[in-house]
Amino acid sequence: MAPKYKLTYFDARGRGEPTRLIFAAAGVEFEDNRLTFEEWPAIKPTTPMGGLPLLEVDGVTLCQSLAIARFAARDVGLAGKSNLEQAQADMFVDEISELLPKMAGLFFEKDEAVKAEKQKEVEELIVKTYTILEKLSGSAGYLVGNRLLWCDLIFFNIASNVENLKPGTVQNYPKLAKSYENVKLNSRIAAYLAKRKETPF
Amino acid sequence: MPTYKLTYFNSRGRAEISRLLFAAGGVKYEDVRLDREQWQQLKPQTPMGHLPILEVDGTMICQSKAIARLIAKDIGMAGKTPLEQAQADMICDSLEEFGEKMLLFLREKDENKKEELKKEFEEKTLPAALDQFEKLASAEGYFAGSSLTWADVSFFAIYNFIDILMPGDHLKRYVNLSKVMGNVSSNPGIAKWLKERPESAF
């Protein structure tokens, strides 16, 4: 029987990885459809908003990476127990996701002088964001409440990229570091990461 | 119902979606409006350092969409099924991206560049966005399912800024979107709020 979910994205982590991590953490099978850049132009006009990722489920096609990830999280029980807990998780996801466009901009910048300037901006934004998240986060080893939720996975995903940029960053933030470690140590995530294909982004 | 306290500036901005939702749900809340000086004093005491903030029984939530989604869920306007909720989320994410493009020319300090960006927004970005949203709205005038959700209210809230920045009947040829606007403005709670809400430029 075909998996219930079909995720379509490029052959990269990027905006597809949050949902892959969520399915991995829950041990849920899904079709991991990876497009080449050559295939994309033909598919683009068939999508709801001209972008990736997409999640097809029960005949419906969803887009917008965080809407997809939140739906997946909810479906597999990683969104949070109450409306309030879910809102706290959403808040973390939105705060941490503000880093994404700046980090992507830095990653793809070719001009060395501009890159140096962007690097400085990104590092400042990381400090600002991590300081906010550290103050907001819970003390039980997870960002919200006392168990792994999708916000921990989203944080882990972006924080891994930050560690590539500046190793040791997360260690300066004790509560965030705990969440980061707990995700890394989660047996399903550890297994997923061990098998995961290396991609530049 | 929990106790709600919404804190923002004395403007619509990123808080109005929440105020509209409270109105639609007939939910009482404390509508705190700070001036710049009050905010400068409060800011260092807040964990997140930006507004709006929603306090729910003492728990602080920030990020305007997280706040709006919570209120929407509490009043039953988030979407009737998980898929509908995802569809509402999708629209709201896309509306936020659209809003960011609007902010690009609003924030531009150079007058000439500002005019250029505004022209590009009005002639290219806006029609392209409206074309897309028209396709995603149903003929009954809903973005998700067949009843009002926060996605419809979010569209209404953002369109208000378009109306101010570039007056004109931009929705004239968009049948579905015009229906969305009608569905939102005729919601009794929202209609009342629109008449009574404090005046502000933005």
Image: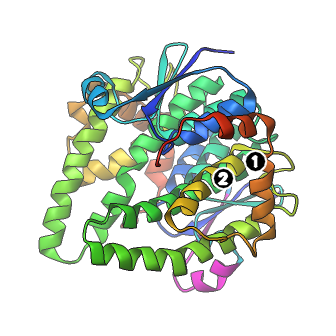
Q: Earlier in the sequence, mark 2 or mark 1?
A: 2
Q: Position of residue A32 (x, y in %)?
A: 63, 62
Mark number displayed over residue B184: 1
Q: Nearer the viewer, residue A47 or B119?
A: B119
Give the answer, above or below, for where A100 lies relative to B79.
below
Chain at numbered mark 1:
B
Instruction: Count residues near mark 2 (Cα–Cα under 10 Å), then give few for <14, some for 14-19, many for 20+.
Output: many
**Could you say where residue B68 lies in the image, as x and y percent from the top left?**
59, 37
Among the 4 quarters of the image, the one containing residue A156: top left
Task: Give the residue displayed 74% in from the left and 55% down from the top.
Answer: B181
Decide: few, some or many residues near mark 1? Use Cα within 10 Å; few <14, some 14-19, many ≥20. many
In depth, the one of A32 and A72 nearer the eye is A72
Residue type for callout 2: Phe
Q: Amino acid at mark 1?
A: Val
Callouts 2 and 1 in the same chain: yes
User: In the rendered view, how is the structure colored?
Assistant: rainbow
Residue A156 or A128: which is nearer the viewer?
A128
What element does badge 2 sit on? helix
The magenta stretch is: A31-45
Q: Find residue A137 and report its horizontal and vertical position in percent.
A: 39, 25
Q: Which residue is mark 2?
A: B156
